[in-house]
Image: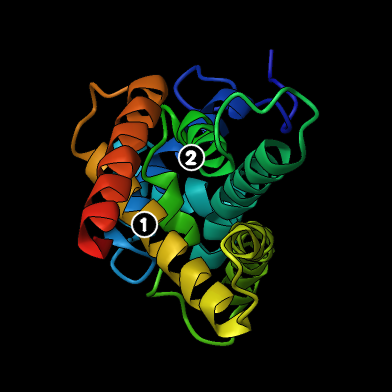
């Protein structure tokens, strides 16, 4: 009996399951290689389907990228917002809560961070605009957090806040890049490591100011 087109798959795999396989492979490829260097053919080969079938399921390469980006962007934005505005007792400093939320959201798909922060997206494309939307939303949350932190030190300089937001984004990217190359590190151990690094940083700064 022929299956309905909406449920049909390839080689006995239901379409929904095959689409999940494609999105997982494509997210990793886009994250590792960047949009420009990633090819639909390579993704199709990796999953074991034909390039025409992949286009049939997802459309163009840009459409496939967007299908990967949107759940990643939604997940990361929700993680940061929840870490900053949640009502649970603040056992950890905000920075560590946000990092733990990011590590947890990325666990199992760590390259997804670089899908969002891809520097090879075509300028003025739908892909670039959508990625910029998520980055701005996350940056806005980071700006709120950095401004609050600076106020506790007596600084109300908006350029200080802007510089710290920029530095924070770079720190998150560097930590995720290191995490990708250390697959045995869990979100919890990464958060604990960051706490130790922050403590060491505070000690160095205190010594430098003496």
The residue at the point 45 percent across, 60 percent down is 168
Left or right of 107? Residue 207 is left
Q: Which residue lies furthest to the right in this view?
A: 87
- Dot 1 lies on which element? helix
The residue at the point 45 percent across, 56 percent down is 115
Residue 30 can be seen, yes or no:
no
Residue 175 location in percent, x, y? 31, 47
User: Which residue, given by chain and number where applicable, does mark 1 sit on?
Assistant: 171
Is disc 1 surrounded by few (<14), some (14 to 19) or many (20+) residues within 10 Å?
Answer: few
User: Which residue, given by chain and number where applicable, does mark 2 sit on?
Assistant: 99
| Quadrant of the rendering where the C terminus is positioned | bottom left
The residue at the point 32 percent across, 48 percent down is 202
Q: Which residue lies furthest to the top in this view?
A: 1
Quadrant in the picture for residue 195: top left
Quadrant in the picture for residue 146: bottom right
In the picture shown, does residue 157 fall above or below 102? below
């Amino acid at each position: 009996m022929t299956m309905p087109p909406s449920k049909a798959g390839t080689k006995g795999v239901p379409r929904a399951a095959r689409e999940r396989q494609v999105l997982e492979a494509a997210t990793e490829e886009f994250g590792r290689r960047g949009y420009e260097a990633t090819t639909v053919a390579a993704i199709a080969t990796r999953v074991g389907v034909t390039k025409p079938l992949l286009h049939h399921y997802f459309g163009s390469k840009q459409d496939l990228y967007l299908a990967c980006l949107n759940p990643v962007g939604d997940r990361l934005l929700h993680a940061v917002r929840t870490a900053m505005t949640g009502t649970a007792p603040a056992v950890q400093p905000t920075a560590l809560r946000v990092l733990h939320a990011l590590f947890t959201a990325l666990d199992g798909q760590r390259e997804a961070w670089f899908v969002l922060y891809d520097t090879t997206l075509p300028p003025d494309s739908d892909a670039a605009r959508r990625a910029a939307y998520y980055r701005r939303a996350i940056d806005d949350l980071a700006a709120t957090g950095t401004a609050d932190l600076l106020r506790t030190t007596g600084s109300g300089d908006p350029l200080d806040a802007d510089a710290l937001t920029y530095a924070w984004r770079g720190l998150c990217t560097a930590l995720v890049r290191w995490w990708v190359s250390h697959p045995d590190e869990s979100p919890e151990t990464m958060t604990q490591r960051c706490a130790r690094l922050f403590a060491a940083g505070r000690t160095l700064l205190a010594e430098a100011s003496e």
